[in-house]
Image: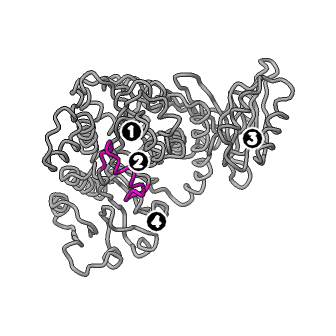
Amino acid sequence: MKILIADNVSKSAVEILQEEKSWNVVFLPKQPGGNVAEEIRDADALLVRSATKVTAQLLAHAAKLRVIGRAGVGVDNVDLDAATQKGVVVMNTPGGNAVSVAEHTLALLLALARRIPQADASMKKGQWEKKKLQGMEVRGKTLGLIGLGQIGGEVARLATAFGMEVRAYDPYVSSLVSGELGVKLASLEEVLKAADFLSLHASATSETRHLLNAQTLALTTPGVRILNCARGELIEEAALLAALESGQVAGAALDVFEAEPPKNPALVAHPNVIATPHIAGSTEEAQEIVGIRIAEQVRDYLLLGVARNAVNMPAVSPDEYKKLQPYLQLGERLGAFLAQIDGGRVQEVRISYDGGLAELNTHLVKNAVLKGVLSHALSEPVNLVNAGAFAQQRGIEVSELRSARRAAFSNSLGVAVTTDTESTSALGMVGLRSMPHILGINDIDIEAPLRGIILFIRNQDVPGVIGRVGTILGSHGINIATFALGRNPETQHAFGLVNVDHKVPEGVLAEIRAIPAVRTARVVEV
């Protein structure tokens, strides 16, 4: 068996694989002139970091490849679709650098509090400015965390040791998990208003892009100090610079930027900003850990068939995958739809399969639903393999039911999501040309395509709502593709699903919400 190591990993990682005497371990960095495309032809496994780009073209050379191991979290350098089509399992090492990133975050926090960079620069100029460089204690201060995953949780543990009170906003973490960390869960607005220090540990999604902007920064406590060792896209840098200039933000410590290297020299050069070049996870220990972990994972997969931290779909037969594919898409979109129309902290997900669908590999369909529910909030890549584990880590209860109760829709998929505020259910099925359709919400019949940008409306069933919504959208140049209405005459509740060609701006949503009969109006992207 041949193991190809294309990028530099620790000596310990190489030795783990070399312990299998029958294996031919090729460590390409020590072979001058070695060619990945040539060596991969007869390789059973490939280990990379970030330098080697595992493209579809490279994979076309691989005749025997069974597994790709990425020593690190991100898999942007691996073509997951091409790997899946070839039946190659792709693994990464999530959490391997969690301690390093958390420690860097705390180092920046203390540097902000005690003005260490300014003091160092002053001393190097031959100055002695004791009074000017007075700092503050972090003991008794409130640390607000946006995101309580592995890194956020580690930051919370370290901050608690310094005597800080920690509050966190993460709609995908249960109170049980936060309680174990000694962290109080709160709404985003509550965290912003309470924090003396605000640290970001969320993923970069369309919903979290520019999470900190002029409006949200205005909600913070005057003099707040902000840290970002997560994703540069989370902060609107122009708004942060303006808040630093006004004094609303007393200081910022940034390891990541919207563009890297950063294109805004004024922000990096600001006297109250500490900037580091995306090095939070760059420690000897972290690189050693991820190298050893990926070597162990690849070894165990080749010897035992155990796939840990796989980031793509497990191998299935072409016929089975062909049957599953439209239901995987349906499940993911139903999950994403329900997660977005509520927005609360998910506590339970219930899934029901009807008819022939119940006879397929529902484990994959279940994880497709969970992927849709979780993908909008987690920094870690969520997929068909790890979605169940992520749900379990966050204390989300998942249940499945096989039933023939809906004879009219014998291959339907039902999903119900319960949050800390409400429970919402939806029924869906695969329509013509394998297009996912929604058939009902909360047992109210409403049929609409489950795709693109959807304006979801919950309203009182009275005349004039449809017309006023259409008029508002039309007046703002927003084209309606389809408009579906579901109603319950007994309760006088109604739902509207409006497929539109463009995203509905917040100002337009505000106009729709101002209609007296409208109870909820949200934009959902699936």
> Disc 1 marks which amino acid?
Leu
Q: Which residue is drawn at 24% across and 24% down?
A: 139
Give the residue at mark 4.
86
Dot 4 or dot 3: first in sequence order is 4
Tell me whether the residue at label 2 lies in contact with that at label 1, contact meaning CB atoms closer than 8 angstroms: yes
Label 1, label 4: how many angstroms apart (C-alpha)? Answer: 37 Å
* SS label for mark 4: loop
Residue 393 visible in the picture:
no
Disc 1 to disc 3, C-alpha distance: 34 Å
Image coordinates for residue 151, horizontal then vertical, percent: 32, 39
**Left or right of 5 on screen, residue 465:** right
Q: Distance between the residues labelled 2 and 1?
A: 8 Å
Looking at the rendered image, the disc whose residue lies closer to the viewer, 4 or 2, is 2
Please give the residue where the numbered disc 3 appears in the rendered image: 498
Residue 483 falls in which quadrant of the image? top right
Magenta highlight on residue 352: no
The residue indicated by pointer 1 is 200
Magenta residues span: 259-275
Which sits earlier in the primary sequence, circle 1 or circle 4? 4
Q: Are marks 1 and 4 in contact (CB under 8 Å)?
A: no
N-term-proximal mark, 4 vs 2: 4
Say which label, 2 or 3, has the lower sequence index.
2
Q: Is residue 185 above or below residue 476?
A: above
Please provide percent x and percent y for residue 142.
Answer: 33, 25
Location of mark 2 (residue):
231
Q: Nearer the viewer, residue 222 or 12?
A: 222
Residue 261 part of the magenta-drawn span: yes
Residue 49, x across and y down, in percent: 30, 61
Q: Are marks 2 and 3 in contact (CB under 8 Å)?
A: no
Indicate left or right for 510 with 257 as reference: right
User: In the rendered view, would you say 265 is above or below 366?
Assistant: below
